[in-house]
Image (cartoon, grey):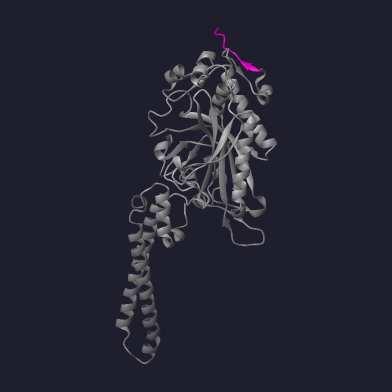
Amino acid sequence: MLDLAFVRGNLPKIEEMLHNRGMDPAAVLRDFPTIEAQRRQAIQSAETLKAERNRLSAKIPAMKKSGQDTTQIVSDTKAMREQIQELEKAAEEYDARMIDVLVGIPNMPHASVPVGSSADSNVEVRRWGTPPKFDFKPKPHWELGEDLGILDLERAAKVSGARFAVYWDAGARLERALANFMLDVHTREHGYTEVLPPYMVNSESMYGTGQLPKFAADSFRVPHGDKDLWLVPTAEVPVTNLYRDETLEGNRLPISLTAYTACFRSEAGSYGKDVRGIIRQHQFQKVELVKFARPENSYDELEKLTHDAEEILQKLGLHYRVMALSTGDMGFSSAKTYDLEVWLPGQQLFREISSCSNFESFQARRANIRFRPEGKGKSEFVHTLNGSGLAVGRTWLAILENYQQADGTVIIPEVLKPYMGTDRIQARKLS
């Protein structure tokens, strides 16, 4: 959430930002300018009445001392006090209405973010590696998975419905191997602390990271007594909220955490998109990276976090590119985002496998996460960052497509062999 005082004082800048994000300022800001004008008028009127009441009140002692009747002036000051209370109450109500608008305003993009209304304006920052070469036509992962007997979408649909998957044998083992490999690299080499958070969170947590109220339709809500719980759309939500309503000591920053969880998304509005394979699922697994940083260091931490995610792809030998997202393609809460896009030869395209974002103080202000700088008494909002390190299912399918062989088998990347206990995935023998 943006600072209310900042929005009040910078409405033209906010409107420009909304235009750059491809949003209609009038639809987002609604009647904010009118409410702000009414609020200012209520405050000014209250201050004017306070000054007049104080002036009259100061006269009362002298009038009493000289024997003058103070009945009318006392009555007038009492009436003024009641009017002041009504105006102050109105100002508070205007504040509440402005905050209701405020929660729907996205974050301000960093100055380095490319301006554009869609993904077409994203800018490629760099590439790593080269696409594999085949002397045969490479297959997409859904064909490979079915031929090998390790990916079963038909039975998943029977059990749960569309956009779910069942992994068999080496397919299940590959998913587990990837998660363990990623966690080991991030904890042993990159300095992250592993966390195993709940897979269900309360509404306060969803609000804190920006999923509520705007994206309620994208998440799975679970009624629980007189409150709601939510299946986590990403480990970002529970891990970031671990420090909600806390003030951290400045010498603890940066704090770097990693978590492996299942993630649940309703994929509202994605009907007809990526219907084949496991690109867009209601349930998928992901290793998440979360950082809490000082404001002056947060963009250095974004570069480090992005590199940490990239290194997983490099160790796996997967060709990828890094894209700086434009204003119109960034997430609601993000100030700057890099997408890592892995090459999928079976589909002849790049596909997002990680988004690494700096939210600056946007989430911290909603979740009230502060830090106390050394030698200073006043606390400040931390900057929060996160990124996938990586999306496990998409890494799974990238390995199938990039390491497929002419005989239909899939070679296991060298770094995964100790986790898999084999160097190749072959067609599963049905018992």
In this view, 327 is above or below 317: below
* Image x and y of residue 85, in percent: 36, 68
Q: Picture quarter containing residue 307? A: top right
Taking depth in this image into account, of 68 and 287 the one nearest to the observer is 287
Q: Residue furthest left?
A: 72
Name the side, left or right, on which 144 lies relative to 21: right
Which residue lies at the image location 67% right of the left edge and 19% below the top edge? 421
Name the side, left or right, on which 383 lies relative to 414: left
* Image x and y of residue 100, in percent: 39, 52
Name the side, left or right, on which 313 lies relative to 10: right
Q: Residue furthest top?
A: 431
Taking depth in this image into account, of 271 and 366 the one nearest to the observer is 271
Q: Picture quarter containing residue 238? A: top right
Which residue lies at the image location 31% right of the left edge and 78% below the top edge? 76
Can the viewer see residue 31 in this picture? yes
* Image x and y of residue 405, in percent: 59, 16
Name the side, left or right, on which 388 lies relative to 92: right
Secondary structure mostly taken by the magenta-highlighted segment of the chain = loop
Which residue lies at the image location 50% right of the left edge and 15% below the top edge? 146
Segment colored magenta: 423-431
In the rendered image, residue 429 lying in the magenta stretch gets the answer yes
Count of labels in the image: 0
In the rendered image, residue 418 lying in the magenta stretch gets the answer no
Taking depth in this image into account, of 300 and 192 the one nearest to the observer is 300
Can the viewer see residue 224 in this picture? no
* Image x and y of residue 69, in percent: 31, 87
